[in-house]
């Protein structure tokens, strides 16, 4: 009957442990936001959707070389691999937290001898089948052999363990979102570095063509000087212009090598021996649908990370609050205990025990209350951080959209400037050959043409980089495939 009684008590405690955990349940902060973007709208309040794949967004640029580089970076970038291992660690921690919902069972094997004082007033302990109610058997005796099996279980009456599991799961979700943030950041950086490299190649092409033109002009002036049709100062002008352009070429080549080495590291490769052949690059900015569905903002992984952290910090308030209440544990033991190995397996050698313990702190100088205050303050800190991330997200989207709009207008004007500068150079050179203009007029026109072309390339570069920034600000691409966890 004692065993039945203890079993009833055990299941009553188990049922009681299913009560709602102490501490506040998480509610998403109500943060007031504008109903539309300044540049484009409408949009919706951000909802974490970090399990939705960001897609191969870079394919919108239709560059097979970029596609290959992005795949290499995803597979081999060491920083991204490090973040991926943090997800595995968080999975293990979440798994460990959930194990505390189940009893712990331990097995032991004891074989030895001991002596008891003949002057002891106590009876010989642990006689087989002699159960001491309310206490665990010690499994010790004169000349003992014992096979004990122990179990221990903490009743989650106040929800401390459940809040720990809640916090661990939230941090696992946060680590998955953090991986998505790292992935999005890496792929954006690869794309931007690649575009900078290609626009640098375009600048090199322009400079090399201008150097060839200046070399031709220099040869022309040198010939005219030999014929007495030009002065030494004319030759000095064209020499200065030629050498200045050559110096700009050397600086641009230096910039290209730096971008090349940076890209190699992003791809997880050694900079030594990493090369990318120069090729004709069409500087075309893709049309990004700025009137995207509002759920694109919902998929920003950094917003998901911030909210998952809110969930975890909210759960920690419950963990701290549970310290106000007693810890209740159930214990049980079952095994065989004998002084004679030949009788170890006999039923008369069996021992068992069940019990319960309660531990309650009476005085700790207010430590529990201070810890609860700390967790509440930490939660408020995360709310402020969450608000800041939302504001920065809105700013990045607005800035990128407006940037593309202004750059589009700037590019149109700059193309007109390039056309005018090229025509001015052509007319100045024709006038100089006809003796109707000074060489300085030609030099000034050539410089203006070079500057206009370089500025046009810089604008195209900025449009490409801003396009990547907009995609990143929107949380990635537009596909909806599921991300593996």
Image (tube, helix red, strand yellow):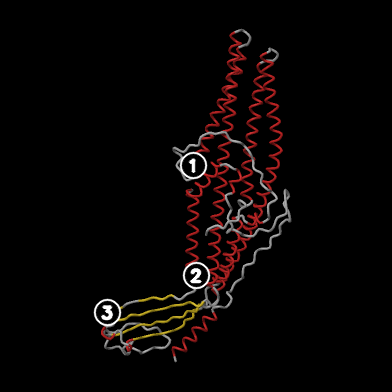
Sequence-wise first label, 3 or 2: 2
Q: Which residue: 44% across, 37% down?
A: 273
- Crowdedness of circle 1 by 10 Å Cα count: few (<14), some, many (20+)? many
Q: Which residue: 55% across, 47% down?
A: 187
Quadrant where the N terminus sits is bottom left
Sequence-wise first label, 3 or 1: 3
Disc number at residue 98?
2
Disc 2 is placed on an element classified as helix
446 vs 167, left or right, is right
Q: Position of residue 103 (x, y in %)?
A: 45, 76
Residue placed farthest to the bottom in the image?
A: 1
Q: Nearer the viewer, mark 3 or mark 1?
A: 1
Query: Which residue lies under the disc numbered 3?
Result: 112
Q: Position of residue 392 (x, y in %)?
A: 65, 52
Query: Which residue lies under the disc numbered 1?
Result: 264
Please name whichever residue, 313 or 197, is drawn nearer the observer in this view of the structure: 197
Mark 3–mark 1 Cα distance, whole angstroms, equals 66 Å
């Amino acid at each position: 009957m004692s065993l039945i009684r203890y079993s009833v008590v055990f299941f009553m405690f188990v049922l009681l442990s299913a009560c709602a955990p102490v501490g506040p349940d998480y509610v998403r902060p109500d943060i007031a936001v504008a109903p539309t973007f300044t540049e484009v709208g409408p949009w919706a309040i951000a909802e974490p959707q970090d399990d939705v794949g960001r897609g191969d967004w870079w394919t919108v640029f239709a560059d097979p070389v970029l596609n290959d580089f992005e795949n290499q970076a995803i597979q081999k970038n060491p920083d991204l691999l490090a973040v991926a291992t943090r997800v595995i660690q968080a999975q293990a921690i979440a798994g460990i937290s959930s194990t505390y919902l189940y009893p712990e069972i331990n097995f032991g094997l004891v074989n030895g001898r001991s002596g008891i004082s003949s002057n002891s007033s106590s009876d010989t302990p642990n006689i087989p089948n002699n159960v001491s109610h309310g206490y665990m058997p010690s499994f010790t005796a004169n000349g003992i052999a014992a096979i004990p099996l122990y179990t221990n279980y903490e009743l989650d009456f106040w929800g401390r363990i459940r809040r720990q599991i809640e916090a661990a799961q939230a941090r696992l979700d946060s680590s998955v979102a953090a991986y998505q943030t790292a992935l999005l950041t890496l792929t954006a950086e690869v794309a931007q570095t690649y575009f900078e490299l290609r626009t640098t190649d375009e600048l090199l092409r322009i400079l090399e063509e201008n150097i060839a033109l200046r070399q031709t002009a220099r040869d022309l002036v040198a010939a005219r000087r030999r014929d007495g049709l030009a002065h030494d100062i004319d030759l000095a002008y064209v020499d200065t212009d030629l050498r200045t352009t050559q110096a700009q070429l050397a600086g641009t080549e230096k910039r290209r090598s730096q971008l090349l080495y940076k890209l190699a590291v992003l791809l997880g490769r050694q900079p030594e021996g990493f090369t990318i052949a120069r090729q004709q690059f069409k500087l075309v900015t893709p049309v990004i649908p700025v009137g995207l569905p509002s759920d694109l903002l919902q998929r920003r992984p950094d917003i998901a990370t911030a909210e998952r952290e809110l969930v975890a910090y909210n759960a920690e308030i419950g963990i701290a609050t549970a310290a106000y209440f007693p810890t209740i544990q159930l214990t049980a033991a079952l095994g065989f205990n004998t002084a004679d190995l030949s009788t170890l397996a006999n039923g008369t050698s069996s021992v068992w025990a069940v019990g319960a313990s309660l531990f309650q702190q009476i005085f700790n100088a207010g430590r529990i209350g201070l810890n609860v205050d700390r967790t509440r303050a930490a939660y408020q800190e995360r709310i402020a951080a969450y608000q800041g991330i939302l504001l920065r997200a809105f700013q990045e989207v607005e800035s990128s959209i407006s940037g593309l709009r202004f750059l589009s207008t700037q590019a149109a004007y700059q193309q007109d400037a390039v056309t005018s500068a090229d025509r001015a150079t052509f007319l100045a050179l024709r006038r100089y050959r006809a003796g109707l203009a000074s060489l300085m007029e030609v030099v000034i026109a050539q410089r203006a043409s070079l500057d206009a072309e370089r500025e046009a390339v810089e604008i195209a570069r900025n449009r490409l980089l801003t396009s990547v920034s907009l995609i990143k600000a929107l949380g990635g691409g537009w596909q909806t495939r599921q991300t593996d966890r």
